[in-house]
Image (cartoon, rainbow, N blue to C red):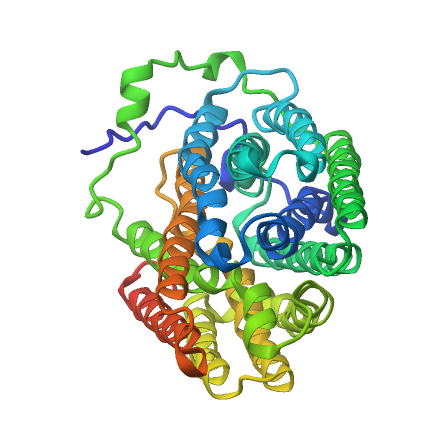
């Protein structure tokens, strides 16, 4: 279905009229993403896989893990574009984006506190309880973060977006590293159950504290201009919902960018959730400690300088070349995972994957920002873009879980070989698709 373009402004600032922002302001805009990545990487890379393996049937962990996370991830696919678009029309005195961040974070912290005490529940209801809480965790967190995805488009002029996207990439990487390391140091499923329960309480309460402090800082330091009264638009539900459907031919560059992101994220998320089990079963090391404390820090340490440099480079030499480089490198890394099935080989692969991942994450936002249609609805389109990063979690983990469970017990860890071969297809297609983007260099 086609979306009628609205030329009436629903943006407090026109992109062409935005004043340059200082480095300090760019950091303040992006520091929320550090806390958000700390939150999610600790939970999905370490805590949830560990809880599923420790507290539920370990022989069914490959299929129980998707059963816990897919329902919450599905709701995030809906919440991101919907709330992002709603924020475009918001008339709060605090601005269009900050009120959603405040409300979502309060709800998010409450769910984190409930999650902290799930290990004490009866095992018969534990799978359902974890799935429900993960559902609420996704809903509340995405209520907070999806409108904030548009804050760069709201406040940063076009000529600074590459640098700001680079800072964004740095915050994402630092948050991811801190989340994995801290969770890996605290949580260990080899510990006795009473000690393990205390570890789960500690890590969830720590995540809640970090979210609270960083969101409070962001709300106080990043100011928004409320939508002027003359730009208020009456929200009509039916036309509003219709606008989420558009012909790809109307915005071809945006459509290709969204498809590329979907494919690239399929490759990343199809493997990411199972890294802890890969360490346990294939590398024969303690999964939480190796993935959280060694593998991911090495990967992110390699990604950090690439992310910083790539954002600046993309402003001067173009975005697409960095996507080609990133996709090629990450494709080759999957081959390394198949060939080098030992801890040293995994760390070598982590270095090269980090280089490709850092380049991709640093230009991913800038690429979609350049491809946005001139409709003054950045929140809506960036909400769809966010959903293209979340939907692959549902598809990727479902395919991965089915493959690993079905091929469990096959010699030479054949299930993981198949999983990495499928991931190669995702990365290759995601890289090729970017060739179709014509309006962005």
Above or below for 279 versus 198: below
Residue 155 appears left or right of 90: right
Quarter placement of the N terminus: top left
Image quarter of residue 129: top right
Query: Residue 74 location, x and y as percent?
Result: 41, 39
Above or below for 164 versus 247: below
Query: Residue 387 location, x and y as percent?
Result: 42, 43
Query: Residue 190 location, x and y as percent?
Result: 73, 61
- The answer to whether residue 396 shows anywhere in this view is yes
Query: Residue 78 location, x and y as percent?
Result: 40, 33
Image quarter of residue 97: top right
Above or below for 349 versus 68: below
Residue drawn at (65%, 66%) of the image: 287
- Choose between 192 and 27: the one closer to the eye: 192
Q: How many marks?
A: 0
Residue 26 appears left or right of 262: right
Residue drawn at (74%, 42%) of the image: 207
């Amino acid at each position: 279905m086609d979306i009628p373009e609205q030329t009436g402004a629903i943006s407090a600032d026109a992109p062409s009229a935005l004043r340059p922002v200082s480095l300090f302001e760019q950091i303040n805009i992006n520091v929320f993403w550090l806390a958000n990545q700390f939150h999610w990487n600790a939970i999905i890379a370490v805590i949830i896989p560990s809880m599923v393996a420790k507290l539920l049937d370990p022989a069914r962990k490959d299929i129980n893990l998707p059963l816990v996370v897919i329902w919450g991830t599905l709701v995030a696919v809906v919440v991101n574009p919907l709330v992002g678009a709603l924020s475009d029309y918001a008339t709060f005195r605090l601005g269009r984006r900050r009120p959603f961040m405040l409300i979502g974070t309060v709800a998010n912290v409450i769910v984190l506190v409930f999650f902290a005490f799930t290990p004490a529940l009866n095992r018969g209801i534990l799978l359902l309880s974890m799935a429900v809480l993960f559902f609420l965790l996704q809903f509340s967190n995405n209520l907070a973060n999806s409108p904030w995805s548009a804050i760069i488009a709201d406040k940063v002029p076009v000529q600074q977006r590459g640098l700001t996207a680079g800072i964004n990439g740095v915050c994402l990487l630092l948050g991811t590293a801190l989340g994995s390391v801290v969770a890996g140091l605290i949580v260990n499923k080899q510990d006795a159950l009473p000690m393990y329960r205390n570890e789960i309480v500690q890590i969830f309460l720590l995540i809640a504290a970090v979210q609270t402090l960083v969101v409070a800082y962001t709300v106080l330091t990043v100011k928004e201009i409320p939508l002027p009264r003359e730009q208020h638009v009456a929200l009509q539900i039916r036309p509003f919902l219709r606008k989420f459907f558009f012909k790809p031919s109307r915005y071809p560059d945006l459509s290709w960018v969204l498809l590329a992101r979907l494919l690239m994220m399929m490759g990343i998320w199809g493997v990411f959730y199972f890294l802890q089990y890969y360490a346990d079963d294939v590398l024969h090391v303690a999964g939480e400690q190796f993935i959280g404390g060694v593998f991911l820090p090495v990967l992110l340490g390699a990604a950090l300088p690439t992310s910083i440099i790539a954002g600046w480079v993309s402003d001067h030499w173009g975005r697409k070349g960095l996507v080609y480089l990133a996709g090629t490198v990450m494709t080759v890394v999957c081959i390394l995972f198949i060939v080098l099935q030992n801890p040293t080989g995994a760390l070598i692969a982590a270095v090269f994957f980090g280089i490709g991942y850092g380049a991709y994450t640093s230009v991913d936002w800038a690429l979609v920002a350049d491809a946005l249609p001139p409709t003054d609805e950045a929140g809506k389109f960036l909400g769809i873009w966010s959903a293209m990063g979340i939907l692959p979690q549902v598809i990727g983990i479902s395919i991965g879980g089915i493959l690993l469970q079905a091929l469990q017990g096959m010699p030479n860890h054949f299930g993981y070989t198949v999983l990495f071969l499928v991931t190669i297809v995702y990365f290759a297609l995601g890289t090729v698709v970017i060739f179709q983007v014509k309006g962005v260099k």
